[in-house]
Amino acid sequence: MGHLASESFNTRVGVKTVIVSYRGTAPALTDVIGGQTTLMVAPLGSALQQIQAGSLRAFAIMSERRSSQLSEVPTAAEAGFPGLNFQLWYALWGPKGMAADLVDQINAGVQAASKHPELVQKLAALGADPVTEMAAQFAAFFTAEATRSAELARVAGIQPPAN
């Protein structure tokens, strides 16, 4: 996701930055904090503590709305770069052909759990907001994300690694 978001940034801003691949977010953040790398696109949950401590500066949030943890940091659109929306998301997956009633039952449990105040508070402290959808809504979201990601990769010339 970080690579695609960085390529989208390059395209949207009209620059060609060098994108360095790291073996994880932590080493990349260490290099930004240490001055070996100028900037990076990072998941908020990974960078939040360093931002709050003053080790990192957040320029923009790459989502449709500001973070409740960093309300003073504008969205990319507010900073003059509309369309730079990249959110780290997770999903529950099941086998193809899973019974619809089982999908609905699991989804109902996830919907209820995601509204539990303690969970909401813990996620907010990490810079995340729980968002749950019905299976059909998620399928549409996933299809749109896959299409967008494929187009970004095509424009940027990103190829899958050779085996």
Image (cartoon, rainbow, N blue to C red):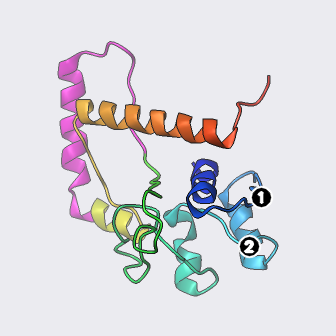
Which mark is first along the chain, 2 or 1? 1
Towards the viewer: 158 or 12: 12
Q: Residue at x 47, y 66 (%)?
A: 81
Which image quadrant for residue 35? bottom right
Q: Distance between the residues labelled 1 and 2?
A: 10 Å
Towards the viewer: 10 or 107: 10
Q: In which quarter of the image is the C terminus?
A: top right
Helix, strand or loop at disc 1?
loop
Towards the viewer: 159 or 102: 159
Q: Residue at x 21, y 40 (%)?
A: 109
Nearer the camera: disc 1 or disc 2: 1
For the record, the magenta segment spans 90-118
Can you give x and y, in whole percent of width and height, for residue 84 in the image? 47, 58
Can you give x and y, in whole percent of width and height, for residue 130 in the image? 31, 55
Q: Residue at x 52, y 39 (%)?
A: 149
Q: Do the residues labelled 1 and 2 touch (CB within 8 Å)?
A: no
Q: Residue 38 carries which label?
A: 2
**Residue kind at label 2, given as amino acid type:** Thr
Q: Which mark is residue 135?
A: none
Q: Residue 18 carries which label?
A: 1
Towards the viewer: 38 or 116: 38
- Residue 68 visible? The answer is yes
Residue 145 against residue 6 in the figure, above or below: above
**Residue kind at label 1, given as amino acid type:** Val
Residue 66 against residue 98 in the figure, above or below: below
Residue 33 within the magenta-colored segment of the rendering: no
Helix, strand or loop at disc 2?
loop
Residue 124 against residue 151 in the figure, above or below: below
